Image (cartoon, coloured by chain):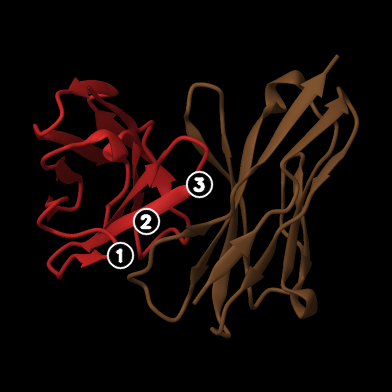
């Protein structure tokens, strides 16, 4: 089956510091990886969509300078939250998709970021 | 721009009955994919079922089925024979099909509580 793992599951960082989160796809090829943030009381905001061997597309209000993403192969992606502040807290979700096999994205369990 | 709207904030049902959730969407694309996911209490996001816009038949998977009304841009989710474990937040999502490199647009979710 198609599985997506994310680490860490929870993290706490001090305001102004940075933290890196990882996403790993197992059982399928993660041709594209989308990173979302689910803030308290909100739905999922798309941060960026990364496609292997192609440019990463960031949504409005999210930038590479703040959320740099790496997607070096068909099973792994990482995203860093630089200079995290209170408004960056939330559940960060990785949704991976195999263009050749599935129309749907499979999600990891998320990384919950708390900023102190 | 694409948009997904779920107007029902929460629904309570008795176990073993049927629950129906609404979702309407907006898109300019003639080809698109519609998905339903559920988010459990632990935060895990589980893919449930999908409907491809070009298919006339309503998708069915297990005790999940869809009511796809294309002229109304509506994709309702029906859960029959509900169980306590079906208690979760249900999200409707869409991906426009013209561009493979697209993330999902989600609705705000409908919280379903199943009681004995």
Task: Give the image location of residue A17, x and y in percent.
Answer: 8, 32
Which image quadrant for residue B72? Answer: bottom right
In the picture, measured across the screen, residue B38 lies left or right of residue B55, that is left
Chain of the residue under the numbered disc 1 shown in the image? A
**Circle nearer the N terminus (2, 1):** 2
Q: CB under 8 Å between callouts 2 and 3?
A: no
Chain of the residue under the numbered disc 2 shown in the image? A
Q: Are there few (<14), some (14-19), or many (20+) residues within 10 Å of tag 3?
A: some
In the picture, measured across the screen, residue A75 lies left or right of residue B28, that is left
Task: Give the image location of residue B55, x and y in percent.
Answer: 68, 74
**Depth check, front residue: B48 or A46:** A46
Relative to B72, residue B58 above or below: above
Find residue A85 and name its label. Answer: none
Label 1 secondary element = loop
Chain B, hue in figure: brown
The Cα atoms of the two marked residues, 2 and 1, are separated by 7 Å
Q: Are there few (<14), some (14-19), or many (20+) residues within 10 Å of tag 1?
A: some
Residue wearing tag 3: A43
Chain of the residue under the numbered disc 3 shown in the image? A
Relative to A60, residue A29 above or below: above
All told, the count of numbered labels is 3
Residue wearing tag 1: A59
User: Which image quarter holds the C terminus of chain B?
Assistant: top right
**Circle nearer the N terminus (1, 3):** 3
Which image quadrant for residue A6? Answer: top left
Instruction: Name the residue located 85 percent from the left edge and 31 percent from the top edge.
Output: B81
Chain A, hue in figure: red
Q: CB under 8 Å between callouts 2 and 1?
A: yes
Residue wearing tag 2: A46
The Cα atoms of the two marked residues, 2 and 3, are separated by 10 Å
């Amino acid at each position: 089956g198609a599985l997506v793992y994310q680490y860490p599951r929870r993290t706490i960082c001090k305001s102004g510091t940075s933290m890196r989160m990882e996403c790993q796809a197992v059982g399928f090829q993660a041709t594209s990886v989308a990173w979302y943030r689910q803030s308290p009381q909100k739905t999922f905001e798309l941060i960026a969509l990364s496609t292997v061997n192609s440019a990463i597309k960031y949504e409005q209000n999210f930038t590479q300078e703040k959320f740099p993403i790496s997607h070096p192969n068909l099973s792994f992606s990482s995203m860093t939250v630089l200079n995290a502040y209170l408004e960056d807290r939330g559940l960060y979700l990785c949704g991976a998709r195999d263009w050749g096999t599935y129309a749907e994205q499979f999600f990891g369990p998320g990384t919950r970021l708390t900023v102190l | 721009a694409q948009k997904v709207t779920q107007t029902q904030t929460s629904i309570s049902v008795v176990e073993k009955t049927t629950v129906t959730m609404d979702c309407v969407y907006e898109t300019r694309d003639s080809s698109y994919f519609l998905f339903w996911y559920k988010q459990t209490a632990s935060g895990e996001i589980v893919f449930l079922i999908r409907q491809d816009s070009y298919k006339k038949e309503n998708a069915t998977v297990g005790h999940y089925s869809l009511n796809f009304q294309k002229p109304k841009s509506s994709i309702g989710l029906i859960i029959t024979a509900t169980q306590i474990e079906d208690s979760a937040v249900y999200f409707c999502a869409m991906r426009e099909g013209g561009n493979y490199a697209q993330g999902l647009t989600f609705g705000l979710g409908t919280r379903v509580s199943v009681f004995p």
